Image: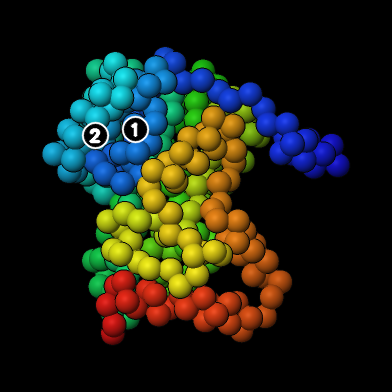
């Protein structure tokens, strides 16, 4: 009862926001979209930025913009986050050249919106490696140092698709469900190990207007809006500062939590009412 009351009070009187001066922030998938916008939001706050991406030119541009926005220390690395050996190799370089990462933002991701039977095994595995296993490897690389000093923050960009599997999202939803389950389990392990100085934040947005969404158009802007990357990044920053465990947006996505209490046909009817399948077919191709 006390914990419920405490959570209610925190909604009315939010806790003081954390500061980022002196933090070492590593962002995967930083060359464009949300990753770039998060980097730009951190830039004037006194943090050291470590940028990982396979797009070297895009990453250089993010680095330039971050420095223009006030970042004093920015380190850009080429890293294929779907490659385990490369992730661990670059993690070693970061520790030697920059220091121990204190805020890890796992943002790298891909979306291949094919129907299950049309999605090749190779593409299914690719999505799992980029969207899920990259987060496994980065957490394994940087979490031990956080545990040693009982200080740090793990931020995982998941998706609303990690809360409800929908049309054309079998591979993507599978990878995001895995991310959410893993991060909840890690948070549980940290709590029971007495490492409550390490925070966890899981981000579950609906579609965002980035390259990933390939021009997805919502049929209902009021209940299921497609957000721009700058707005989502600002909400992510707020969630990190307030040390929220979940950021789910829009609020209508929270109703996914009730899916297990509803008849399956009602959930499918909800999808039909919002023309979700048609919108995904238009964005990712009719088949």
Q: Quadrant of the N terminus?
A: top right
Q: Residue 95 appears at what percent x and percent y?
A: 30, 21
Q: Going by the image, does 148 lie left or right of 90? A: right
- Count the marks: 2
Q: Residues within 10 Å of mark 2 (few under 14, many from 20)?
A: many
Q: Residue at x 55, y 23 (%)?
A: 18
Task: Identify the residue at image location x=39%, y=43%.
Answer: 230
**Residue at screen point 43% across, 78% down:** 277
For the residue labelled by badge 2, is the local secondary structure a helix, a strand or a loop? helix
Give the image location of residue 7, x and y in percent. Answer: 74, 39
Q: Are marks 1 and 2 in contact (CB under 8 Å)?
A: yes
Q: Residues within 10 Å of mark 1 (few under 14, many from 20)?
A: many
In the picture as drawn, the residue positioned furthest to the right comes out as: 1
Between residues 92 and 38, which one lies in front from this camera angle? Answer: 38
Which residue is denoted by mark 2 in the rendering?
62
- The answer to which image quadrant residue 190 occupies is top right
Residue 184: x, y in percent?
Answer: 57, 46
**Placement of 176 over or under 155, stated as above or below:** below
Residue 39 quadrant? top left
Q: Taking 4 as reference, is 92 above or below it?
A: above
Q: Is residue 244 visible?
A: yes
Question: Residue 263: x, y in percent?
Answer: 67, 80
The image quarter in which residue 112 lies: bottom left
Closest to the observer, 41 or 81? 41
| Sequence-wise first label, 1 or 2 | 1
Residue 39 has which mark? 1
């Amino acid at each position: 009862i006390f914990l419920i009351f405490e959570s209610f009070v925190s909604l009315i009187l939010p806790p003081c926001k954390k500061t980022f001066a002196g933090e070492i922030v590593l962002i995967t998938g930083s060359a464009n979209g949300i990753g770039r916008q998060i980097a730009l939001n951190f830039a004037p706050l006194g943090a050291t930025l470590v940028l990982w991406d396979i797009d070297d030119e895009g990453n250089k541009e993010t680095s330039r913009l971050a420095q223009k926005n006030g970042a004093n220390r920015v380190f850009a690395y080429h890293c294929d986050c779907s490659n385990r050996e490369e992730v661990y190799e670059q993690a070693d370089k970061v520790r030697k050249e920059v220091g121990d990462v204190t805020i890890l933002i796992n943002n790298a991701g891909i979306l291949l919106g094919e129907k299950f039977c049309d999605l090749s095994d190779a593409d299914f595995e690719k999505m799992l490696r980029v969207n899920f296993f990259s987060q496994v490897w980065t957490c394994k690389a940087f979490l031990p140092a956080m545990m040693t000093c009982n200080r740090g923050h793990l931020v995982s960009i998941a998706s609303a698709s990690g809360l409800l599997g929908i049309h054309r999202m079998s591979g993507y939803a599978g990878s995001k469900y895995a991310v959410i389950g893993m991060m909840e389990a890690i948070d549980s392990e940290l709590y029971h190990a007495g490492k409550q100085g390490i925070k966890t934040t899981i981000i579950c947005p609906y579609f965002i207007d980035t390259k990933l969404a390939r021009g997805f158009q919502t049929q209902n802007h009021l209940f299921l809006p497609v957000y721009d990357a700058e707005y989502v990044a600002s909400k992510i920053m707020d969630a990190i500062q307030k040390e929220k465990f979940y950021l789910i947006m829009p609020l209508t996505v929270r109703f996914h939590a009730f899916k297990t209490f509803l008849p399956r046909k009602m959930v499918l009817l909800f999808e039909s009412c919002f023309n979700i399948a048609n919108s995904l077919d238009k964005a990712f191709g009719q088949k």
